[in-house]
Amino acid sequence: MVGNGPTAVTIIAQQHGDEMETSDSAINLVRTLSNGSAESRSIRAAMKVIIVPRVNVDGFDGKRADGTPLTNAAGTQVPPWRENWDPRFTTNPLPAFYARGRGYDINRYHAFRPECPLDNPNYPNFTTVAGVLGAGSVLLELRGGIGTKAGGYIQKIGFHASLASVRELAKDPTLAAFAPELADVLVVPANGVGPSPGPGEAITDGYVPSLIEEADDQHLGN
């Protein structure tokens, strides 16, 4: 934790165990907020910034507590995993975003209203609600696989985006001066063509039915 101000904010990185780059972003943020600059002192006076550089340790390590490797449902060793390790769920029905015998996808749990079936895929079974569901949050999703400099770019983007968020929260924790409509402007790239919504992610058997854990090995950063 950095700072002792009245406003608390939590920054977590590497929700997916195989997305390592933003752990470095978080560590650099700790260094910056801990330095002696006037801005950092001002932020520390206004906020308590709790930073977890690697929240999905299970997925990153890819090992059980006894040191044996984690494996997927087919018995194949696939470290590191995207999900955390939670082997309790081995039969149907599985909670939303769980992989059988493996764990759940942490960064899918960012909806704001746990009592709403549109936001909470586990509704009305609140006993399976996990990670940060019900809290206001911003998910910064970064993708690598764009060349040898990708890791460095991702680290810088994660650092600057996190620092910018902390700066604004230190000024006004309600963010009342910002209009949500600005998000629609930010996602339009330089060519003026907006993003395609795609087919969506249907939930089948408790999780998104794909081989994303094995096939998406270039999906770096979180």
Image (spheres, grey):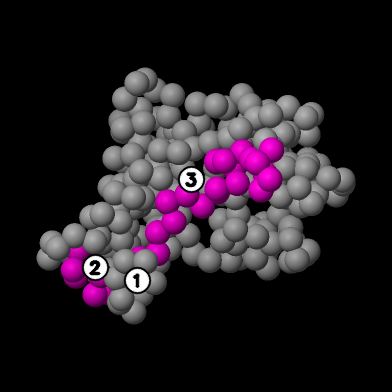
In the image, residue 72 lies at what x, y percent? 73, 33
Q: CA distance from mark 2 to mark 3?
A: 24 Å
**What label does residue 14 carry, if any?**
3
Tag 3 and tag 1, C-beta contact below 8 Å: no
Q: Tell me where the magenta segment starts and ends, as one range.
A: 40-68
**Which tag, 2 or 1, sits closer to the chain's start?**
2
Q: Is residue 189 left or right of residue 140?
A: left
Q: Secondary structure at mark 2?
A: helix
Q: Given this view, does label 2 or label 3 mark the residue nearer the observer?
A: 3
Residue that label 2 marks: 43
In the image, residue 208 lies at what x, y percent? 70, 39
Whether the magenta-drawn stretch holds residue 41 is answered as yes
Name the residue: 36% across, 31% down: 151
Q: Secondary structure at mark 3?
A: loop
**What label does residue 146 carry, if any?**
none
Residue type at tag 3: Gln
The answer to whether residue 161 of the structure is visible from this angle is no
Mark 2 Cα-neighbour bin, 10 Å: few <14, some 14–19, many ≥20: many
Q: Is residue 23 left or right of residue 56?
A: left
Residue that label 1 marks: 48
Residue type at tag 2: Ile
Q: Quadrant of the N terminus?
A: bottom left
Whether the magenta-drawn stretch holds residue 26 is answered as no
**Which tag, 2 or 3, sits closer to the chain's start?**
3
